C-alpha cells in the first residue's frame, strides 16, 4: 500500500446553493444499501429536535411482523419502521397478493412523502416492486417531484430504474467486490438479517 499526505486545505469550493430536500438512491449488487439508508435515518432521527419533522422507514419486501435487528433497535428508540410486503418473491405463495401488498404499501409511503410532516422517508427495497411491475414508476416519479421542498427521500434496491437515477440528487452504487455467501458462508445474523 502506498501512503499519502493528508490534505491540509479544502480543494473544492463550499456549495452556496439553497438547502432543500434531496432524493438519494443506494443501488448496485454490493452489500450495504439498506444499511446505509438506516444509518441516514438514524442521523436524521437524532436531529429531529432541530428540524421538528418525523423520520419513517418503509420496507417493501419485509413482512409487517419482521423482527430483524434493525426492527428491534428502531423500536427501542421510537423510529418507525414498517414492513409492507410478504418476504422474498421466491417464497411467496401468491405473487398477485405480493403485488397488492406493494401497491397498498406505496399508498402509505406516498402519503408520508407528501404530507409535509416528514423530514426523511426511506423506501427500502422499493426497486423490486418497481422492476416486477407491481408499482407504476410514473407515480413514484411524480410523487418525488411533488413532495414538499424540505422532504428528503432515500430509495434502495438493486437495478434501480434509470428514470429514478436521472431524477435523484445523489446516487451511490454499491459494487460487489467479494462476498462471503459466494464462498459458501451462510448469512450471519446481526450482519445480514
Image (cartoon, rainbow, N blue to C red):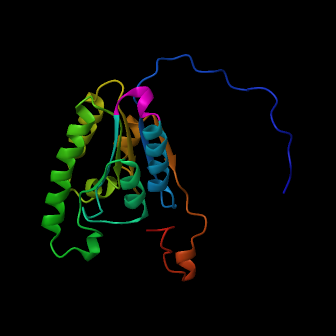
Most foreground residue, 163 or 9: 9
Does 83 appear above or below 138?
below
Q: Per the image, is 159 magenta?
A: no
Q: Per the image, is 49 magenta?
A: yes
Can see residue 138? no
Residue 176 position, x and y percent, is 55, 63
Q: Residue at x 54, y 83 (%)?
A: 184
Q: Quadrant of the N terminus?
A: bottom right
Residue 146 position, x and y percent, is 25, 28
Q: Quadrant of the C terminus?
A: bottom left
Can see residue 7? yes
Residue projecting furthest to the front: 76
Quarter of the rendering containing residue 5: top right
Q: Is residue 43 left or right of residue 12?
A: left
Residue 138 position, x and y percent, is 22, 40
Q: Is residue 57 left or right of residue 134?
A: right
Quarter of the rendering containing residue 69: bottom left
Residue projecting furthest to the bottom: 184
Does 82 appear above or below 25?
below
Does 127 appear above or below 170?
below
Residue 99 position, x and y percent, is 17, 60
Q: Residue at x 49, y 41 (%)?
A: 43
Quarter of the rendering containing residue 115: top left
Q: Residue at x 41, y 27 (%)?
A: 51
Magenta-drawn segment: 47-53
Amino acid at each position: 500500500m502506498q501512503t499519502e499526505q493528508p490534505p491540509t486545505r479544502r480543494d473544492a469550493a463550499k456549495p452556496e446553493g439553497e438547502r432543500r430536500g434531496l432524493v438519494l438512491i443506494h443501488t448496485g449488487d454490493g452489500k450495504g444499501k439498506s444499511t446505509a439508508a438506516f444509518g441516514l435515518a438514524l442521523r436524521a432521527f437524532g436531529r429531529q429536535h432541530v428540524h421538528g419533522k418525523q423520520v419513517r422507514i418503509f420496507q417493501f419486501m419485509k413482512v409487517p411482523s419482521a423482527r430483524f435487528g434493525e426492527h428491534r433497535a428502531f423500536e427501542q428508540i421510537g423510529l418507525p419502521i414498517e414492513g409492507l410486503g410478504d418476504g422474498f418473491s421466491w417464497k411467496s405463495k401468491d405473487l398477485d397478493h405480493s403485488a397488492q401488498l406493494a401497491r397498498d404499501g406505496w399508498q402509505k409511503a406516498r402519503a408520508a412523502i407528501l404530507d409535509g410532516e416528514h423530514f426523511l422517508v426511506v423506501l427500502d427495497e422499493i426497486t423490486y416492486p418497481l422492476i416486477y411491475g407491481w408499482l407504476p414508476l410514473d407515480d413514484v416519479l411524480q410523487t418525488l417531484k411533488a413532495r414538499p421542498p424540505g422532504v428528503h427521500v432515500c430509495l434502495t434496491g438493486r437495478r434501480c430504474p434509470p428514470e429514478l437515477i436521472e431524477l435523484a440528487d445523489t446516487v451511490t452504487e454499491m459494487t460487489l467486490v467479494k462476498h462471503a455467501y459466494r464462498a459458501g458462508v451462510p448469512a450471519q445474523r446481526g450482519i445480514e438479517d
